Each structure stands twice: as structure tokens, then as C-alpha cells.
Amino acid sequence: MQATAPFKRGDSFLITADFTNNEGLTVSKDQLRSQVRTRYDKLIAELVITEKSANVFDLTCDDTTKWPTGNLYMDLQYTDDGEIVSTETILVPVEKDVTHDEP
């Protein structure tokens, strides 16, 4: 399982992905979907996908203040002509942020 670098809760979440379909062909952001979930399958965030260039996408979440600390999980799902294919699961280790506003 791949993993992101440790991520601090409250920071803006950003992953840049280079993605093509199984045949190496270009995909559009409308064919992609990505979520962050706990190990118990609780939805934490539906990531916003922005196309940067051909086959390069930013996956973002601006508000992570309520994300739990510990290990979260994500993948990137591609849909084409009714066929759904998901990438390998990616581990997202979330740490407590030291600098933050008081609740």
C-alpha cells in the first residue's frame, strides 16, 4: 500500500496525480472520483478534482479541521462506459496540528 507524507489536520489537503486509463489514454476529470475514508468506511471528504494538464489532476480538500487523527484511506476511481476501476488504496496518515485557532 502506498502512503502520502504525514498530513497535519487543519492544513489544506493536496495531492497531484498523473493518471491515464488502463490503455494509457487520456481521461477527463469528469471520469474521476476520489474520497477519503476511515478504516471503518466512514466518509471524511469527497475530494475536489481539478485538471492541471493532460492526465495531471489536483485532488484537494480545503477544510480538514474536523479530520480525525490517525490513518485514513483514499483511492482514485475511474469510470468509462460503465466500467469502474479503482487505483491501489493510499494511506493518509493524519497528525494533530500544533498551530491552530482555539475552538
Image: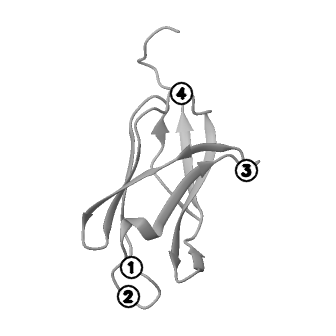
Residue sitting at 57 percent across and 70 percent down?
A: 88
Q: Which mark is residue 99?
A: none
Residue 69 at x, y percent in the picture: 61, 33
Identified by mark 2, the residue type is Gly
Q: For mark 4, what is the residue? A: 96
Q: For mark 2, what is the residue? A: 24
Q: For mark 1, what is the residue? A: 20
Q: Under tag 2, what secondary structure?
A: loop
Residue sitting at 47 percent across and 25 percent down?
A: 97
- Marks 1/2 in contact by CB < 8 Å: the verdict is yes
Frontmost of labels 4 and 1 is: 1
User: Residue 22 vs residue 85: left or right?
Assistant: left
Q: For mark 3, what is the residue? A: 41
The answer to which quarter of the image holds residue 20 is: bottom left
Residues at marks 1 and 3, CA–CA distance in whole angstroms: 26 Å
Q: Under tag 4, what secondary structure?
A: loop
Frontmost of labels 4 and 3 is: 3
Name the residue at the left extreme: 53
Identified by mark 3, the residue type is Asp
Residue sitting at 53 percent across and 9 percent down?
A: 103
Specify few, some or many for label 2: CA neighbours under 10 Å numbering under 14, 14-19, or 20 or more: few
Q: Under tag 3, what secondary structure?
A: loop
Note whether 83 is above or below 74 in the view shown: below
Specify few, some or many for label 1: CA neighbours under 10 Å numbering under 14, 14-19, or 20 or more: some
Name the residue at the bottom extreme: 23
